[in-house]
């Protein structure tokens, strides 16, 4: 996990990093994730900051606490993350793109054709 100096609070970056690690399979469903102590030492961060990030994922039911044992990845966590990211992608990219395309006078066929050409370009590279 890498922390960038920007406007995003570190605890949110912690949550996103853990979420990425769960989504990519580094931490599997049912598996224990590193403790707040391990992470705070590893990243030289306050344990409270780590816990605040973890608690965001607990609230979203992506991870859960086992009292006295640690934090674990919930069953179905990867699917929850996928749904969350698909929604974010739609709101952050698709909706603004469609709105701008409409403003430019594009129809559905034009948009699909443009996207298809971009995909073809990316596949070739």
Image (cartoon, rainbow, N blue to C red):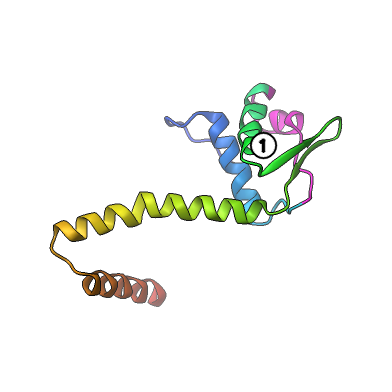
Whole-percent x and y of residue 46? 65, 22
Query: Disc 1 marks which residue?
Result: 58
The residue at 29%/72% (across/down) is 112
Q: Is residue 113 left or right of residue 120?
A: left
> Measured along the vertical axis of the image, is residue 111 above or below residue 88?
below
Which range is magenta?
Answer: 30-47
Nearer to us in this view, 119 or 66: 66
Whole-percent x and y of residue 28? 73, 54
Whole-percent x and y of residue 19? 61, 46
Nearer to us in this view, 2 or 51: 51
**45 falls in the magenta region:** yes
Nearer to us in this view, 43 or 65: 65
Q: Is residue 83 left or right of residue 64?
A: left
> Measured along the vertical axis of the image, is residue 103 above or below residue 57?
below
The residue at 60%/52% (across/down) is 80
Q: Is residue 28 left or right of residue 82?
A: right
User: The residue tagged with tag 1: helix, strand or loop?
Assistant: helix
Q: Callout 1 environment at 10 Å: few (<14), some (14 to 19), or many (20+)?
A: some
> Measured along the vertical axis of the image, is residue 46 above or below residue 21?
above
- The quarter of the displayed image where residue 50 is located: top right
Whole-percent x and y of residue 47? 69, 24
**69 falls in the magenta region:** no
The residue at 24%/75% (across/down) is 109
Q: Is residue 69 left or right of residue 43?
A: right
């Amino acid at each position: 996990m890498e922390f960038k100096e920007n406007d995003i609070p570190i605890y949110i970056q912690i949550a996103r990093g853990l979420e990425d690690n769960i989504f990519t399979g580094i931490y599997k469903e049912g598996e224990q994730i590193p403790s707040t102590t391990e992470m705070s030492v590893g990243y030289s961060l306050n344990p409270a900051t780590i816990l605040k990030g973890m608690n965001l994922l607990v609230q979203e039911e992506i991870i859960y606490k086992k009292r006295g044992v640690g934090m674990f990845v919930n069953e179905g966590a990867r699917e929850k993350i996928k749904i969350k990211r698909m929604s974010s992608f739609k709101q952050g990219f698709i909706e603004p793109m469609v709105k701008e395309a409409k403003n430019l006078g594009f129809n559905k066929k034009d948009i699909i054709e443009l996207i298809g050409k971009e995909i073809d370009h990316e596949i070739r590279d």
